[in-house]
Image: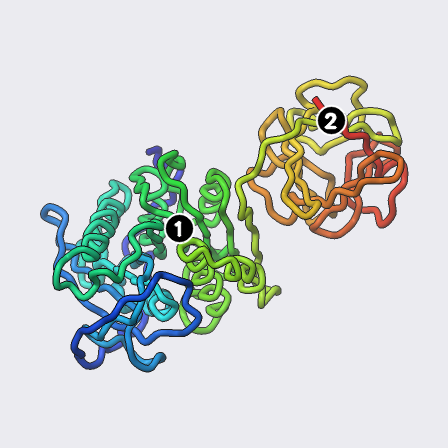
Amino acid sequence: MAMNRRTFLGLGAAGAVAAVHAYGTTAATASSLAPADAPTQRFAIGVREYAWSRGSRRLTTRIFYPATGTPGGNPVVNAPIADGVFPICEFSHGLGGNPESYAPLVRPLAEAGFVVPAPVFPTTSSGTQGNVQDVYNGNQSMDVSQVITNTLALNTTAGDPFAGHLDTTTGVGVAGHSLGGMTTHGLLTAWPDSRIAAAVPFACVDMGNPSSTVAAKVLFVHGDQDTLTQYSSARQAYGELPAPKAFLTHRGTGHDQYIWSGYNHTQTVATYVDWMRWSLYADTAARDRLPADATSNTSTTTWEAVLTSLPTGPIVSLRSRASNQYVCAENAGADPLIANRTAVGDWERFDLIDLGGGAVALRARVNGRYVCAENAGANALIANRTAVGPWETFQRVNNSDGTTSLRAQANNLYVSAGNAGTAPLIANRTTIGPSESFDLING
């Protein structure tokens, strides 16, 4: 894996440690079983510790889980497991952290009905010297795979309290912050685990090319002023992955403020938990809540998502009624689109992708990139984006004369072949005329 894909994380850079919460009292174990379903209630939290290992690497793992009792208290050691069958969602701590220091991200999952194994990594947890190479050489990603294997095995381990309580059919979730986020992304790329169905890397960097053996729904969460794990690297990782995927940006913030109570913590947790509910419980109501979860504070967050795999066609060319010339991804997509070509070649062909509900995206055949209403429609359209978000989404309008107009979702204005086609296309018109009307020609 080329090192220039990643930002190296030095000792002390990642994994801010919050106050450790006491476990509380010990309780006896007991349980009865119920079918797996998306819970509607909040659970109390139990915790059990397992002394596992992978070869010579000690993997002390604390498993947090839905428990009987009154919600809202500290985790109770060996508390009775709540009735039900629950999905598994592993969590990886950052440098100098441990499962307790990441309580703001671990506890909400257990309260929502997930079994959360959280390993204490042997070289990057609190009290260690912090060997960050164990992330770059894949040790921590392979540690997580071992923890997943061991946790799944508990479902059929006679006498273990988790026996019969673990969902082993829908895949598992993984999440982590900073070095833990990189560990998580490594499981999708360089050290893939095909059992993963959902992933949330917080503040990660790009750990490599996506693996074709992993089909996971992936949510990235990052601060755009992060100086420890570069935002641009996470954006690259996002662009490389296929849908379903999403990106929650905390604007104007750094490496971890949005995780702890306070700054945008509510948006982080609501989005993260609903992502896992959708991915592992097939909870479509949770999926539909995601945009509101992420943008309840719209002044400081940005939500981008492609929640369905995109079809590939049909291939079309767009001929402007104003100039009778074809729209071109000028300079192989490096320059703004302009309706100035008399014939159709590679630069004039686009995949017209149906996003549902009348929404479409255009992907230039010449470079495989999506047309963007740049700067929320204030700048000319350009085919330069690797993923579909609001700026790459257009509402298709079928006009009575057989032409098509495109209204940008970013600003609700129509795309116009400016100055009768002599100027670049821009989404800046409130009404439809010849400059906003295009013949869509297949092939």
Q: Which mark is residue 40?
A: none
Q: Closest to the observer: 418 or 152?
A: 152
For the view shown, which residue lies furthest in the left direction? 56
**x, y percent for residue 12:** 29, 58
Name the image quarter holding residue 109.
Answer: bottom left
Q: Report the coloring of the rendering.
A: rainbow
Residue type beneath disc 2:
Ser
Vertical position of residue 17 compared to residue 204: above or below? below
As drawn, is 161 to the left or to the right of 12? left
Q: Secondary structure at mark 1?
A: strand
**x, y percent for residue 106:** 33, 65
Q: Please name the residue shown 61% across and 64% down the image.
A: 298
Name the image quarter holding residue 368.
Answer: top right
Looking at the rendered image, the quarter that the N terminus falls into is top left
The disc, 1 or 2, on the residue closer to the chain's N-terminal end is 1
- Residue denoted by label 1: 198
- Residue denoted by label 2: 317
Q: Is residue 17 visible from the viewing direction of this image?
A: no
As drawn, is 107 to the left or to the right of 424? left
As drawn, is 71 to the left or to the right of 404? left
Q: Residues within 10 Å of mark 1 (few under 14, many from 20)?
A: many
